[in-house]
């Protein structure tokens, strides 16, 4: 697990295209929390995980059948995709959806934003080319602080939630961090194949789990607006997003790809402004500034010029 991106890549930081992918992914995954909140009102969290990964996998297979490349490229890596699907989809999705049933969105956003911290720690221990640096640590801490400030009073209001829900969100962040490190081994595989492979494996894992846990009764019983949220979650926030995500890991490394979780809360606020007519509070502006400073610190180029 020590081979992948050259050391020079980490030293020069991300390209403009990589940063664009981070911002775009942050926007897409900011919407995923909104869709998930709608869906879990009527669907069991495990059932929602199954629909999310199965519909996304089916969409990617349809695309591959029409445009290529062949999915046969994934077959020799079937075991790796099973593990990737487990730690990148099945475990974190289940923990997040379960946690969202008993936790305020504010605290959930802060705990999810700790993913870059865990990724930096794991990358330092398990890789040869993504080591700790002062700007990475300082930038991530600034980013997490920014998320906490941006949540503001909503964070205080959600602190009294059940302990198990908090551990569920931290567990999801740790699982994502392990997945980011593990995904480095797919650097020679096209990102769309990686996305299709891990989502197919996730669906294969989740189908028997859901049937044993919940049974087939009522599996498809949901309101039209819930199905619309499920489709948006599967097609946009999963199928398309994972193609971008694995391409980002390939070009920028695990630690840099994990920065998406710092952008997600900002995008959620922007989406609220645009589609829900919400007001932008002063503490939210302060939090966004902190997150921006954190990303600039991690990138390092402005600091080096100074």
Image (cartoon, helix red, strand yellow):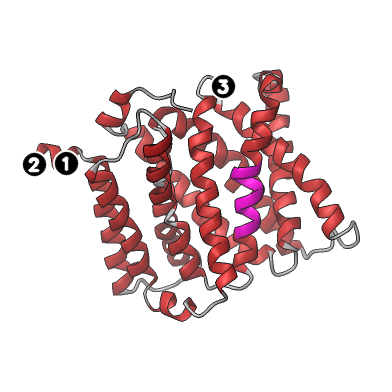
133 falls in the magenta region? no
Main SS of the magenta part reads helix
Q: Is label 3 in a helix, a strand or a loop?
A: loop
Asked where in the image residue 100 lies, by quadrant, the reply is bottom right
Name the residue carrying label 2. 306
* Residue 105 % position (x, y): 51, 69
The stretch of residues the image draws in magenta is: 86-95
Task: Return the residue found at the far right.
Answer: 217
| Circles 1 and 3: CB atoms closer than 8 Å | no
Disc with the residue nearer the chain's start (2 vs 3): 3
Task: Left or right? Give the position of 206 relative to 102.
Answer: right
Is residue 20 shown left or right of residue 277? left
Q: Nearer the viewer, residue 52 or 298?
A: 298
- Relative to 223, is 89 above or below? above
Residue at image coords 58%, 39%: 240
Cα separation, mark 2 vs mark 3, equals: 39 Å
Can you identify the residue that label 3 sits on?
189
- Secondary structure under the numbered disc 1 in the rendered image: helix
Q: Residue at x 38, y 32 (%)?
A: 252
- What residue would you read off at disc 1? 302
Disc 2 crowd rating (10 Å Cα; few below 14, some 14-19, many 20+) is few
Q: Name the residue located 50 percent from the left edge and 53 percent from the top edge.
A: 173
Q: Is residue 90 magenta?
A: yes
Residue 21 appears in view: no
Q: Of the residues under marks 1 and 3, which one precedes in the sequence?
A: 3
Q: Residue at x 46, y 62 (%)?
A: 111
Badge 3: residue crowd in 10 Å (few <14, some 14–19, many ≥20)? some
Q: Position of residue 69 (x, y in %)?
A: 64, 19
Q: Are marks 1 and 2 in contact (CB under 8 Å)?
A: yes
Question: Could you give the CA–CA distance between mark 1 and mark 3, rounded to whole angstroms?
Answer: 33 Å
């Amino acid at each position: 697990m020590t081979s992948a991106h050259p050391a020079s890549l980490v030293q020069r930081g991300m390209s403009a295209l990589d940063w664009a992918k981070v911002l775009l992914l942050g926007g897409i995954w900011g919407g995923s929390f909104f869709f998930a909140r709608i869906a879990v009102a009527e669907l069991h969290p495990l059932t929602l995980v199954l629909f999310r990964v199965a519909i996304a996998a089916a969409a990617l297979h349809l695309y591959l059948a029409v445009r290529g490349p062949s999915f046969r490229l994934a077959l020799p890596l079937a075991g790796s995709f099973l593990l990737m699907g487990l730690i990148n989809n099945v475990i974190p999705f289940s923990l997040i959806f379960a946690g969202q049933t008993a936790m305020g969105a504010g605290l959930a956003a802060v705990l999810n934003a700790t993913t870059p911290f865990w990724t930096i720690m794991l990358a330092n221990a398990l890789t040869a080319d993504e080591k700790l640096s002062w700007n990475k640590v300082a930038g991530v801490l600034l980013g997490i602080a920014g998320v906490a400030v941006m949540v503001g009073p909503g964070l205080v209001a959600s602190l009294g939630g059940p302990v198990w829900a908090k551990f569920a969100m931290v567990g999801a962040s740790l699982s994502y961090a392990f997945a980011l490190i593990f995904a480095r081994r797919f650097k020679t595989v096209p990102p769309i194949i990686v996305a299709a492979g891990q989502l197919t494996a996730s669906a294969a894992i989740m189908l028997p789990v859901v049937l044993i846990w919940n049974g087939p009764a009522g599996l498809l019983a949901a309101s039209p607006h819930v199905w619309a949220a499920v489709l948006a979650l599967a097609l946009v926030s999963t199928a398309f997003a994972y193609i971008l995500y694995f391409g980002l890991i390939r070009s920028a490394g695990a630690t840099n790809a994990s920065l998406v979780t710092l952008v997600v809360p900002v995008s959620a606020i922007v989406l609220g402004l645009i589609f829900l007519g919400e007001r932008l509070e002063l503490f939210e502006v302060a939090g966004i500034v902190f997150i921006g400073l954190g990303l600039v610190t991690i990138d390092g180029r402005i600091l080096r010029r100074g």
